[in-house]
Structure formats: C-alpha cells, structure tokens
Amino acid sequence: MITIRKALVKDAPTIIEFQQKMAWETEHLTLVNEKISKGVNGVFADPSRGQYYVAESTGIIVASLLITYEWSDWRNANVWWFQSVYVLPEYRRTGVFRKMYSFIKDEADKNKVAGLRLYVESNNVNARKTYEALGMGSEHYTMYEWLKE
C-alpha cells in the first residue's frame, strides 16, 4: 500500500539521493553533494521556498517531489509547481505518481490554489504520457529559461 505525506527533515538524505539519481538519469549530470544537500535542506529551513512530499510503501520512501509557489496576479492566487519528481524505477508505472498527484490536487483545492504546473525534460516521453493521462496539457505555454550552472 502506498501512502503520501508531507516530507520531514529526516527524509532529506533520501530526497537528496533521489535528486542525484534523477539528474543522472535525465541529463547525465552529477550534482555536487554539498550544493544539493544545502538546496534540499534549504526548503526545510524556509517553507516559503516550497514543500516536499514523499510516497511510502511499507515504511520505505519510494518517491518524492517538491511543490514550489508562483503568485498569479491574474488569478489573485498561487499556482503550485511540481518539481524534482522522482520515483524509484521499480515503482514506476504502478500508479505512485498518480496517487501523489491526486493528493497534491486535493491539497491545492483545500488551499484555494489556482492551478498546478510542471515542466518536463522534452525527451522524457514516459513522463509526458503520465502527465497527459492525468489531464494536464502542454499546449498553453512554451517555457524558456536561462540558468547559471
């Protein structure tokens, strides 16, 4: 059975490990341990940065994600962004993310959030299919970015 909950600071080492795995899987990037550790722990230290959620199976964390906040002046409400989504390979395509999405969507409704957004690496076809199956669309905006390394 899968349960979803807000992450606790004691979950940080697992979240850090998941982020390192995701960076390698998706972009063949090796994250600097000190930097990712400070980044993850920075969310726990300052909740205005976001909130991690985890999925557990028999007490073992099998997935995590980060929700960050964007203020929408058009909607006079926050939009929540899914970020840093990672599911252990053996739990993919088993409904774990679907359950997490449903949990977050319910939380968003309770908090009068205007909507949910995410971005996905353009070649990640499986993730795109998952998000589309949940009713999310990608036809409204195209994302551009500038990032420092």
Image: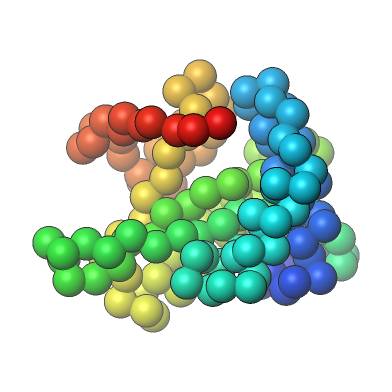
Q: Is residue 130 left or right of residue 29?
A: left
Of residues 51 and 104, the one nearer the viewer is 51
The percent position of residue 82, horizontal first and vertical second, equals 48, 52
Total of numbered circles in the picture? 0
In this view, the residue in front, 133 or 70, is 70
Relative horizontal placement of residue 58, taking residue 127 as reference (left or right): right
Quarter in which the N terminus is drawn: bottom right
Q: How is the image coloured?
A: rainbow
The image position of residue 40, as x and y in percent, is: 67, 57
Q: Is any atom of residue 136 visible in this view?
A: yes
Q: Does residue 124 sit above or below 73 in this rendering?
A: above
* Rendering quarter of residue 12: bottom right
Residue 88 left/right relative to 64: right
Q: Residue at x 22, y 62 (%)?
A: 72
Residue under the image location 63 percent in, 63 percent down:
42
Of 90 and 82, which appears nearest the observer? 82
Answer with left or right where residue 102 lies relative to residue 18. Answer: left
Which residue extends farthest bottom? 110
Q: Quadrant of the C terminus?
A: top right
Quadrant location of residue 79?
bottom left
**Looking at the image, is 54 positioned above or below residue 132?**
below
Residue 133 visible within the image: no
Q: Position of residue 9 (x, y in %)?
A: 75, 71
| Residue 94 screen position, x and y as percent | 69, 44
**Residue at point 47%, 72% (across, down):** 48
Q: Is residue 98 above or below residue 71?
A: above
